[in-house]
Amino acid sequence: MKKPSTSRVRAARIDGEAPRVGVAVARAVAALGVVTLLALGAQAADHRESALTTGDPPADIADVYAWHDDVQRTLVAAITFDGIKTPVPGQAGTFDPGVLYTLNLDNDGDNVADLRIQTRFVVLPAGQTFVVVQGIPGSTAPVIGPVERVVRRGNARVFAGLRDDPFFFDLEGFRQTLMTGTLSFVGTRDTFAGKNATALVFEMDLDAALQGGTSVNLWATTARAGAAE
């Protein structure tokens, strides 16, 4: 995935089956419903724009993207976080087991979530990291699998891993515009080019997400275990 703005993403190929997992992942699935959380989404900005998110990069949402396919009747949504990272050899994605990522879907236009896709990461005793996703429309069970590959259950498919940050922005042009009062943006100057972010990508059944409606609004929140919401 590379270079979308608020509604464009280059999608990763979606294939592969989720492997069997053990007790640690099963416990993470159960924890999705009982953990006490500190909500961060309403208190913070993205792209390291506030002290709160700068101090907690795994919970710092960069952007949310979504697109659909009317022929295949699928909806794809992506959340990027912990972005603006300069690539280095051996760099990995950010998979913090203490953060809950929620993609909210409003399909009746009242700006209240009708569906919630919740994601957590689990590190197994042997060191492998798994992604656990619950609540994908059209799927009756969690989607579970290793990070850095696409996993699926039925028609629901998920990817979690490091990607080139798809956000496009001319920061130099923005600063020049503020200083001079003259629009100074350059369409080929991308401050985020060559920077990495961790991405969560979900593919789901479009009709299951719409629930009989004609449109869907999406937004994402993060929360960290350890304090009352």
Image (cartoon, rainbow, N blue to C red):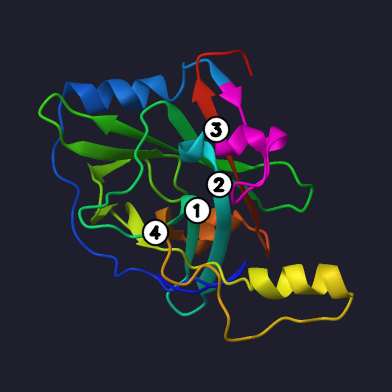
Residue drawn at (47%, 32%) of the image = 100
Which residue is disc 2 drawn over?
61
Mark 4 vs mark 1: in front: 4
Look at label 3 and name its amino acid: Gly
Callout 2: SS? strand
Residue type beneath disc 1: Ile
Which SS class for mark 4? loop
- Indicate yes or no whether the magenta region holds residue 92: no
Say which residue appears at 32% left-offset and 48% top-offset.
93
The disc, 2 or 1, on the residue closer to the chain's N-terminal end is 2
Give the number of the mark in front: 3 or 1. Answer: 3
Front one among 165 and 175: 175
For mark 3, what is the residue? 55
Tag 1's secondary structure? strand
Disc 2 + disc 1, Cβ < 8 Å? yes
Q: CA distance from mark 2 to mark 3?
A: 13 Å
Residue 52 coordinates in the image, percent (x, y): 63, 32
The tag earlier along the polypeptide, 2 or 3, is 3
Q: Does 154 sit above or below residue 98?
A: below
Q: Is residue 70 above or below residue 113?
A: below
Q: Along the horizontal axis of the image, is 97 left or right of 130? A: right
Identify the magenta region: 38-55
Q: Name the residue rendered at 57%, 86% in the picture.
A: 188
Q: Earlier in the sequence, mark 3 or mark 1?
A: 3
Q: Earlier in the sequence, mark 3 or mark 4?
A: 3
Asked if residue 124 shows in the view, the reply is yes
